Image (tube, grey):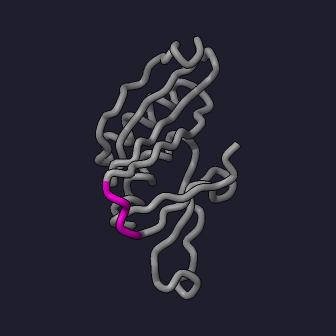
Amino acid sequence: MIDHMGIKVADFDRARAFYDAAFAPLGASFLYMVPGEYTGGVKVGGYGRERPIYWLHEAAPAEGHSQHVAFSARNRGEVDAFYAAALAAGGRDNGAPGLRAHYHPNYYGAFVFDPDGNNIEAVCHSAE
């Protein structure tokens, strides 16, 4: 149901390096950088598979207000690969890949804190 959304990141280049690595296993990549003349020089860019849906906006994140975003994975292997890539890119563990049957029997997810402390998840809802 998400059309698009954005989060604040303290260091755009650091966040971009993290998301480049974490999103590659999900088939998503950096697709668009908004020209600085439209943002007052602030770095703003978006990730997606076919069009940008997840936007990074360089700004001081509100202290103590992390966000949670879950991204769909096409299979459980993508969840596993997302988790490994995100940790290798500097993310912090917030829940290794596995079933979360308390949501539903096939809920397979992994959780990582990004460099700004946002709780980023990859989830697969199929039995594969």
Q: Quadrant of residue 54?
A: bottom right
Rendered position, 121 above or below 23:
above
| In front of the other: 59 or 51 | 59
Query: Where's the N terminus, which quadrant?
Result: top right
Q: Is residue 101 visible?
A: yes
Whether 60 is among the magenta residues is: yes
Rendered position, 9 above or below 89:
below
Residue 98 spot, x, y in % from top left: 44, 19
User: Residue sitting at 42 percent across and 69 percent down?
Assistant: 58
What secondary structure characterizes most of the magenta part? loop
Residue 56 spot, x, y in % from top left: 49, 62
- Is 125 placed left or right of 41 in the picture? right
Rendered position, 87 above or below 55:
above
Question: How many numbered markers are drawn?
Answer: 0
Residue 94 spot, x, y in % from top left: 34, 33
User: Residue sitting at 49 percent across and 46 percent down?
Assistant: 23
User: Residue sitting at 45 percent across and 48 percent down?
Assistant: 67
Q: Quadrant of residue 92?
A: top left
- Is 6 placed left or right of 18 in the picture? right
Residue 38 spot, x, y in % from top left: 58, 83
| In front of the other: 24 or 123 | 123
User: Residue sitting at 51 percent across and 43 percent down?
Assistant: 69
- Is 89 placed left or right of 123 in the picture? left
Q: Is residue 115 visible?
A: no
Query: Where's the C terminus, which quadrant?
Result: top right
Magenta range is 59-63
Whether 80 is among the magenta residues is: no
